[in-house]
Amino acid sequence: MLPPLVFSVENLETRAQLRKRSYSSTPNLLRFEKLCRCILSSMEAEHEPKVWYVSLALSKDLTLLWIKQIKTILWYCCQFLNQLKPEILQDSRLITLYLTMLVTFTDTSTWKILRGKDLPEHAPLSVSSPVVAAQFSDNLLRPFLIHIMSVPALVTHLSTVTPERLTVLESHDMLRKFILFLRNEDRCRDVCECLEGCHTLCLMGNLLHLGSLSPRVLEEETDGFVSLLTQMLCYCQKYVSQKKSNLTHWHPVLGWFSQSVDYGLNESMHLITKQLQFLWGVPLIRIFFSDILSKKLLENQEPAHAQPASPQNVLPVKSLLKRAFQKSASVRNILRPVGGKRVDSAEVQKVCNICVLYQTSLTTLTQIRLQILTGLTYLDDLLPKLWAFICELGPHGGLKLFLECLNNDTEESKQLLAMLMLFSDCSRHLITILDDIEVYEEQISFKLEELVTISSFLNSFVFKMIWDGIVVPRESQSEEIKLFLMTMGDEDCPLWFWLLFRECDFTLYPTENAKGEALELFQSVHGWLMVLYERDCRRRFAPEDHWLRKDLKPSVLFQELDKDRKRAQLILQYIPHVIPHKNRVLLFRNMVTKEKEKLGLVETSSASPHVTHITIRRSRMLEDGYEQLRQLSQHAMKGVIRVKFVNDLGVDEAGIDQDGVFKEFLEEIIKRVFDPALNLFKTTSGDERLYPSPTSYIHENYLQLFEFVGKMLGKAVYEGIVVDVPFASFFLSQLLGHHHSVFYSSVDELPSLDSEFYKNLTSIKRYDGDIADLGLTLSYDEDVMGQFVTSCSRPPLLGFAYLKPPFSIRCVEVSDDQREPGGRLPTSSTCFNLLKLPNYSKKSVLREKLRYAISMNTGFELS
């Protein structure tokens, strides 16, 4: 029997010190091999607890040291396994030895000490015994948090395998001890630096899990718990990167991370993520925001009754604003900025700290950001009550206070702005996932009048951020970019910028005098503002001229643009809606005129502009226009183009083109390319709005045709020629690049494509029963005719409308026995583009026979 002193853990070195030493020499390898064999031999002894190596863990003086030692031993086992070769006999024996070590000390079911009467009474969570015996001294709490509570999903495993062991932690009020220890900034930083980011998340997950099991403790220690969670997230946030580099590693929760990543945690990451979800779960949110949620919103006694929905942008604004969804016997007052609450009060500080916690989690746990937002918006009354809280801040309420915070680099200002950011991010997420019925009729969370108030607040706040120079572009814009900016974001002419200029992006950064958080703040409030603006564009909820800035005179803006002032350019880029559309059009025309003068495209006394002459046959207007204009340079396309028409007899038409003939040509060619018969574009059901045809690819050169269409529309806009091209709103959103936004909702755009399908789809959302009972399937059928009747592998250049002879169908009389499923197949006369269909008895037989004949891809033998 081996004496226990063989496994003395006195004078243990730290893992970092051990790594510095070389164990590659033969004597060291032999010593380590003997150590492992002695340890395993001790674990096999029967009824000898004093001999078992694991028994050292039950000593209050040796527990933590034992854990450090076994972790180091197992680490070396892994290191040696990487170097050994199984084909060598001696190495194969060592591989077996080290694997046995790993299995033995990672699978507690092999430990005899945990079986039957050999289990000591204090073993259920014996590792906590030294901490308890030392009366929770800081010297032992620290290593307990670092080495025990950082074990991935430890609390989850304990609650699943041995739930009775959690009672030991609860009986000693361990969570409160952890909170009191870690709320100290220096101690919390020390623990985080020892663990690094990956294992800090593990510790955080275990603490959150314990908190969910001890709500009473959290209610009493909310401030301390919020503080330590914020500090842990801030530590991790320092190493979160926005993009991949040579110094970053991918983490499934943090994203690109500049610290080393322990990939051994990947298998446990789903459990760790589930623990982190307690942070934005309803129970913790109710505890943290109890002061806000406990307040009742003021109520009116006269309810406003809901009325049936009406088509988009048709219902008068006054009637729409009177709507409200009646959920109870009374409806609350509309929340508006009133002021009166001191920002230095304990209540305000507590709410600000909680908002900082959640805002930090959004910017740190980047890969589960949407989960966090969804959890924070689950309670319908949280966001309106948070808005009510914001409205009460400061002497005058909301806007003035937050505008002052922009220029104050104090901790108090940062916390207030973090509250605004959290409100903006969560509200934007909520409105994005709500459909029109929930926003306009049911008015979930916010009343329509409140959305008007909020959008007014945001509009002013974003304008001031830009106009006061809180954010500036990284580089100045060129004249063409300013043309691009003039028309971006308006519902009346959102296509101009796409037709004339390539898509571009601008990088913003805070000014030297601004806080580092200014850019994140701008992105939050601007994103929330634009979601409201786009919702209002689709279906009005705000009064007329609500989005305009009355204090921004067009003449001032024009002067700013002439001086190449960045703030004027940013106004046009980010919030063009604050300027009347008429003024933007005038500015655009003025810029076009200046550009023409600069390019020499205007007639002067000393020079005449270059003129491009084209000849167009009336009978082949589209083909001739396509061939002669598609190759023109950008400069020539912007210049003067003169058109000579040739009539159907081949004779030149009389008349001189002084822009009138070109306008006629342009309008006619645009009319033809958007004809659905050409199959470049299709129309929506109902309002017949245009969008690219999904089957436009049947044209061999369909991409070139789309490019040609864009040039023609661009030329019309450039010359100020008004054309009637009603595009579907979902298509315009694609052109504007909205679909690149993480908050873009294709479901919101669905009504502009198929309003009936949208109505049916959203009705499923409100179905109270089991959806499976409806037996629904979602499928899409598309019938494309071609390659069977014409004998050609490609359709005509301009579509089947130009097929000669024209496509036609003839019914062929056949006997009764040939009309059944086993009868005659459809045939075609390809010389005449004629499809001959037998008079089948059923539509299903016709479909089956026609598809069979087409798919066989044979000649005359089937007929």
Image: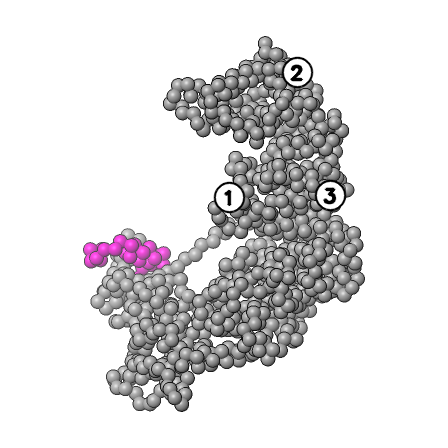
Q: Residues within 10 Å of mark 3 (few under 14, many from 20)?
A: some
Q: In what element is the residue under mark 1?
A: strand
- Could you tell me which residue is drawn at 60 percent across and 59 percent down? 519
- Look at mark 2 in the image and give the residue it sits on: 117
Read off the magenta span.
Answer: 836-863
Q: Amino acid at mark 2?
A: Lys
In this view, the residue farthest toward the left is 861
- Could you tell me which residue is drawn at 43 percent across and 56 percent down? 780
Nearest to the observer: residue 519 or residue 810: 519
User: Mark 3 or mark 1, which is nearer to you?
Assistant: 1
- Could you tell me which residue is drawn at 66 percent across and 34 percent down? 145
Q: Earlier in the sequence, mark 1 or mark 2?
A: 2
- Look at mark 1 in the image and give the residue it sits on: 249
The alpha-carbon separation of the residues under discs 3 and 1 comes to: 32 Å
Q: In what element is the residue under mark 2?
A: helix
Query: Could you tell me which quadrant the C terminus lies in?
Result: bottom left
